[in-house]
Image (spheres, rainbow, N blue to C red):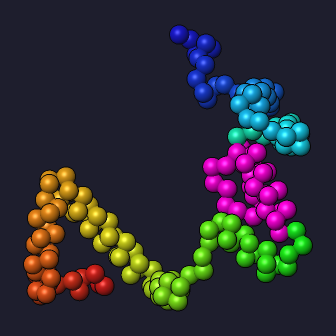
Amino acid sequence: MTRDNDLSAERYDVSEEDIAYFNRLDLDEYERKHSMTPAEKRAVRKWVASGHSVYESPGSRYVCDLGMDFLSVWRTDHEIAAAIRGKTKEEAAAFIKEYCGYTDPTPEELARMDALRNTPVYVQRKYEKLCRQIFLLWDYLAEEGLLSDAKEYLDSHRDDEPPLDFSFILD
């Protein structure tokens, strides 16, 4: 095979026309699979005509839309906008929090977050490394079928002095 006949990815250019063509194919398939109101259909078609995929998210005005397609975001935003119309900013914010399932952190959670923010980075990194090592140890014990033995040992030696000097963690 000669280099001229090589159709590898680095030699193939995708034009805007190609992208528009595939986006249009996706739109046709999407319209066959999903029922939409005329307003929704116009919005989806306008989105695709502007160069986007029907499966691409425009970004929501109100919620985190990870994994949502255009129509899902559009419907969600219109539902929330209708629900908060005429509300004060505080009422609208409370509605959106409830809609998303957000709850304010408890005082204990706030204290924990504040402590984490004030913990030196090197201590955070050592903690993360230790957590990874403990996870790997427990994973090994699980793979070897020793979890119940390990838990039994820990329960029976809970009040014993640690067998190791852990001061190295803060070094």
Q: Is residue 116 left or right of residue 170?
A: right
Q: Is residue 157 left or right of residue 75?
A: left
The number of callouts visible is 0
Q: Position of residue 63 (x, y in %)?
A: 70, 62
Q: Position of residue 150 (x, y in %)?
A: 14, 67
The residue at the point 26 percent across, 61 percent down is 136
Q: Position of residue 21 (x, y in %)?
A: 78, 26
On whether residue 62 falls in the magenta region, the answer is yes
The quadrant of the image that shows the C terminus is bottom left
Relative to 112, does residue 128 appear above or below in the rendering? above
Confirm whether residue 82 shows in the render.
yes
The residue at the point 63 percent across, 54 percent down is 66
The residue at the far top in this view is 1
Task: Give 114 or 148, whichever is nearer the viewer.
Answer: 148
Q: Find residue 134 and report its image quarter.
A: bottom left
Task: Report the magenta residues as a range.
Answer: 56-84
Task: Give 115 or 149, whichever is nearer the viewer.
Answer: 149
Q: Find residue 41 and report its image quarter.
A: top right
Task: Give 166 or 74, whichever is nearer the viewer.
Answer: 74
Q: Find residue 14 and report its image quarter.
A: top right
The residue at the point 79 percent across, 78 percent down is 91
Q: Is residue 53 left or right of residue 11?
A: right
